[in-house]
């Protein structure tokens, strides 16, 4: 039986990188009596799939992973059992059963929304957001193995809004092909006013992670349509 | 939720692996500091990944935190990137749990696992804002106490410590904490407390002892300043390893540390008196944990940590009486739980090969032999009870089991070494390769051929070993001998399948000086630290020239410690410690080494080393 867990990650655990978080969950499951299924072969490992890796320093209210458990496991007790094994800062919020042949968490991800706040002064303003909306291209330079690429963030932003000139809410592409990091979006945005992100320390909270339903709408990864 | 970190976010985001510094790991112990009488900081003076892998600290962390009046927290050396930031921004060193300054603690315990960590001790003290020299400290500073194998010669670092605990930590800390509490309650001075502490068995307060030197800087006398403290300090040890502290819920780090597994210590001590090996002497007598104790702990530890691997720990696991029963139990239990088993320090024989086939991926793993010396003559000198026949038979068993990779560990620069002994290393490797081609028919050779890796380290004489009298080789000797080894390997018929690697010589030289050093070295270590030496154990940070300059400035000749012939009756700086094994026994072994005479292991025949006075372990049963 494949199940999908939703969890949040806050506090100092935001400094735990993705690979270590996967190891952390594997060890956590081993401390419970939930029977997780393993791959075959000489060094068997748990069959797990995480949605979109969360960057170091980013907190989240909506993280997901899939795991395969024994068919006879009771889904109603799983959240409590796993929560008993969590370090302070990670909370298991939900678990749902996945239909047969359902796309795994990693491949499902279409978008994520983020909340950005500034520790000190905020460089944001309605005027800046207007400039963003008016511009054809808002860019940053992405350096990869193949060289430097100019990325137009507008192609990857689904929604953008501002509250009190201090908090930015964005919904961006988070699919494996088109993932836009919120820090890069901010970098491109501030460049419109010749400002540098480095001068405005900020905090990122991922609010939720989304997939597309049958009609193409964005729905949270745990809103599984069983039809 | 707000979890406090000593380091501000912008610092944590700018350094490598912030996970090293944030705490809150599974099973980490948090207590209400207002309900605590004693705050103890347990420090491993190296980076988190190394320190978190150490079983000794896990045992003591568990013990201290079982004391209701005590909170034990962990402290590690900040990595070089954070070290720089902390100095620039004046951030004091903090504990992992409370993230509070180390200076707020009552005790700072520092484990001394290898000599090359000595400058990191100064790093820890300095970043904590604790005066580096013990006599300059006040009650505003924690009591700085050292323990672990290097405290068997604490003299080179004597100036930096208020106290050393000689021996195994499980036995006397409770008493020390009680004396501390009483002393504080009575409003006594730091000196008064230390004087009282010096009367507790196993405790050494360096400032209460005074060395007197001869004109040639050898030791003339070493005496306590008061007649109510012992002239000789007997090591502490646990007599019954089934009736003592053993953590059932060790801390599980978030990041991958060196020992990312459950570690089961099956016994202490070693029956084999290899003459170069300090651990083989200072942990005598051999004491085993019962197989019931170990089965119970293994199950609880796997359950409480969620680790996917378990490893046995001891100096020579094959010598554990119930090794077969224990390993069979683990294989059954762990296979069910999909847990891997690591079996280091197993002698290669039919049993271990059978077991390894079950627990390892034969195609990928390699088997390790530690003959330590290439010739039988030299193996007799070092008392390594292993013949060429044993090695070849073991290798053939492994080859038949499907292994094609063999690793061999040797030492260069052992006492009385001749060129033929070095040539012996090459010849032994060649014989093992030849045995492969002889034992395995062509069509059954998995990867076509065998891979042999010979690795040499340079021998460093250590206190409390029969070789404590030995003259050490110079770095030039070492380089020449490594060259010779390479030359002889190239001369072998099967040289193509033998890979040779060797360790650096400069670091070995410093380790040699510090290992058999005296109190005059504290100044040298301090000077090297002030020149920027830290993380000397990491070759990329080791500054040989800075050390050489420091010796010069302090007018201390490093050659004195390494290349001097020591007389049979020389008084050594560490002779005020009684590790259980008598000096007379060590001297007898040194003479037997010269003659190439092998001494039986403890199980075969008692050699009267002196440890029987502890009245426990193999000395009273199981020979």
Image (spheres, coloured by chain):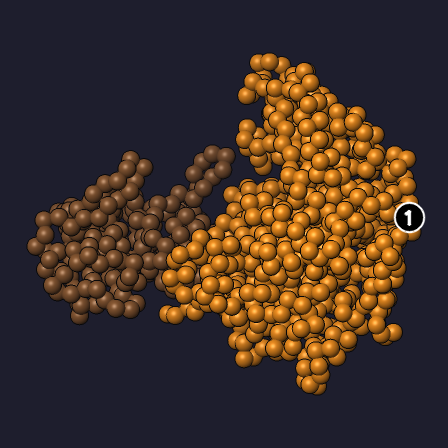
Q: Name the residue under label 1.
A: B568
- At 10% from the left edge and 52% from the top edge, which residue is drawn? A135
Find residue B282 and report its horizontal and vertical position in percent. 78, 53
Q: In which quarter of the image is residue A145?
A: top left
Q: Is residue B460 above or below residue B71?
A: above
Q: Residue furthest left?
A: A134
Q: The brown chain is which one?
A: A
Find residue B473 and report its horizontal and vertical position in percent. 76, 39
B365 sits to left or right of B586: left
Find residue B108 and report its horizontal and vertical position in percent. 63, 68
In front here: B449 or B439?
B449
Find residue B52 and report its horizontal and vertical position in percent. 56, 55
State whether residue A20 appears in this view: yes
Q: Quadrant of residue B247?
A: bottom right
Crowdedness near tag 1: few (<14), some (14–19) or many (≥20) residues, C-alpha within 10 Å:
few
* Count of marks placed on residues: 1
The N terminus of chain B lies in which quarter of the figure?
Answer: bottom left
- At 85% from the left edge and 44% from the top edge, which residue is drawn? B565
State whether residue B24 appears in this view: no
Q: Quadrant of residue B595?
A: top right
Q: Is residue A183 above or below residue B435?
A: below
- At 57% from the left edge and 55% from the top edge, which residue is drawn? B532
In front here: B534 or B163?
B534
Q: Which chain is orange?
A: B
Q: Is residue B143 above or below residue A99?
A: below
Dot 1 falls on a residue whose secondary structure is: loop
């Amino acid at each position: 039986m494949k199940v999908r867990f939703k969890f949040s990650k806050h506090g100092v655990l935001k400094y735990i990188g993705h690979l270590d978080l996967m190891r952390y969950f594997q060890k956590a499951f081993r401390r419970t009596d939930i029977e997780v299924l393993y791959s075959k072969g000489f060094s068997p490992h748990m069959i797990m799939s995480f949605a979109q890796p969360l960057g170091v320093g980013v907190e989240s209210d909506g993280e997901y992973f899939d795991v395969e458990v024994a068919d006879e496991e009771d889904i109603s007790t799983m959240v409590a059992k796993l929560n008993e094994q969590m370090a302070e800062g990670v909370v298991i919020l939900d678990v749902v059963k996945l239909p047969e042949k359902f796309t795994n968490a990693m491949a499902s991800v279409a978008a994520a929304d983020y909340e950005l706040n500034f520790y000190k002064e905020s460089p944001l303003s309605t005027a800046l957001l207007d400039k963003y909306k008016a511009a054809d291209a808002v860019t940053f330079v992405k350096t990869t193995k193949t060289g430097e690429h100019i990325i137009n963030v507008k192609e990857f932003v689904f929604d953008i809004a501002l509250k009190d000139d201090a908090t930015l809410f964005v919904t961006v592409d988070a699919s494996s092909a088109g993932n836009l990091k919120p820090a890069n979006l901010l970098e491109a945005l501030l460049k419109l006013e010749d400002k540098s992100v480095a001068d405005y320390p900020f905090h990122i909270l991922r609010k939720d992670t989304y997939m597309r339903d049958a009609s193409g709408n964005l729905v949270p990864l745990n809103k599984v349509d069983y039809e | 939720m707000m979890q406090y970190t000593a380091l501000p976010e912008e610092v944590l985001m700018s350094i490598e692996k912030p996970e090293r510094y944030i705490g809150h790991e599974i099973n980490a112990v948090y207590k209400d500091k207002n309900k605590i009488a004693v705050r103890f900081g347990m420090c491993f003076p190296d980076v988190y990944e190394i320190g978190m892998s150490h079983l000794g600290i896990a045992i003591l962390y568990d013990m201290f935190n079982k004391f209701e009046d005590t909170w034990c927290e962990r402290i590690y050396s900040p990595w070089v990137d954070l070290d720089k930031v902390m100095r620039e921004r004046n951030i004091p060193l903090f504990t992992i749990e409370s993230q509070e300054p180390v200076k707020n603690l009552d005790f700072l315990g520092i484990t001394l696992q290898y000599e090359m960590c000595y400058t990191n001790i100064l790093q820890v003290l300095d970043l904590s804002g604790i005066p580096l020299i013990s006599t300059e400290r006040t009650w505003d500073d924690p009591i700085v106490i050292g323990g672990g194998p290097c405290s068997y010669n604490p003299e080179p670092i004597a100036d930096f410590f208020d106290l050393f605990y000689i021996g195994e930590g499980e036995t006397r800390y409770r008493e020390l904490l009680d004396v501390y509490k009483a002393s504080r309650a009575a409003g006594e001075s730091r000196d008064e407390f230390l004087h009282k502490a010096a009367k507790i068995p196993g405790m050494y307060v360096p400032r209460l002892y005074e060395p007197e030197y001869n004109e040639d800087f050898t030791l003339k006398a070493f005496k306590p300043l008061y007649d109510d403290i012992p002239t000789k300090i007997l090591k502490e040890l646990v007599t019954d390893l089934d009736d003592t502290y053993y953590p059932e819920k060790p801390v599980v780090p978030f990041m991958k540390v060196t020992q990312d597994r459950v570690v089961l210590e099956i016994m202490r001590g070693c029956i084999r008196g290899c003459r170069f090996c300090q651990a083989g002497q200072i942990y005598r007598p051999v004491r085993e944990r019962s197989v019931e104790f170990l089965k119970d702990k293994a199950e609880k530890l796997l359950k409480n940590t969620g680790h996917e691997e378990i490893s046995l720990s001891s100096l020579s696991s094959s010598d554990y009486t119930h090794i077969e029963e224990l390993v069979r139990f683990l294989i059954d239990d762990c296979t069910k739980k999909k847990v891997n088993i690591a079996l280091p320090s197993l002698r290669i024989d039919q049993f271990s090969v059978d077991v390894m086939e079950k627990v390892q991926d034969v195609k990928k793993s390699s088997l390790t032999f530690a003959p330590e010396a290439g010739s039988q003559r030299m193996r007799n000198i070092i008392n390594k009870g292993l013949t060429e026949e044993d090695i070849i038979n073991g290798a053939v068993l492994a080859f038949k089991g499907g292994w094609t990779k063999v690793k061999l560990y040797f030492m260069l620069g052992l006492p009385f070494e001749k060129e033929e002994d070095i040539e012996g290393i090459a010849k032994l490797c060649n014989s093992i390769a030849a045995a492969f081609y002889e034992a395995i028919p062509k069509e059954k050779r998995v990867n076509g051929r065998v891979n042999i890796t010979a690795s040499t380290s340079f021998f460093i004489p250590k206190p409390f070993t029969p070789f404590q009298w030995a003259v050490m080789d110079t770095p030039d000797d070492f380089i020449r001998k490594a060259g010779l080894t390479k030359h002889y390997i190239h001369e072998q018929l099967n040289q193509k399948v033998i890979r040779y690697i060797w360790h650096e010589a400069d670091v070995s030289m410093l380790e040699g000086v510090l290992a058999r050093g005296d109190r005059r070295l504290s100044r040298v270590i301090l000077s090297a630290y002030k020149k920027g030496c830290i993380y000397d154990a990491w070759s990329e940070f080791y500054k040989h020239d800075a050390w050489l300059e420091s010796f010069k400035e302090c007018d201390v000749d490093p050659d004195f410690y390494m290349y001097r012939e020591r007389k049979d009756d020389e008084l050594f700086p560490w002779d005020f410690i009684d590790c259980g094994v008598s000096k007379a026994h060590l001297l007898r072994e040194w003479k037997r080494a010269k003659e190439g005479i092998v001494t039986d292991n403890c199980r075969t025949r008692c050699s009267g080393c002196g440890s029987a006075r502890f009245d426990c372990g193999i000395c009273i049963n199981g020979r």
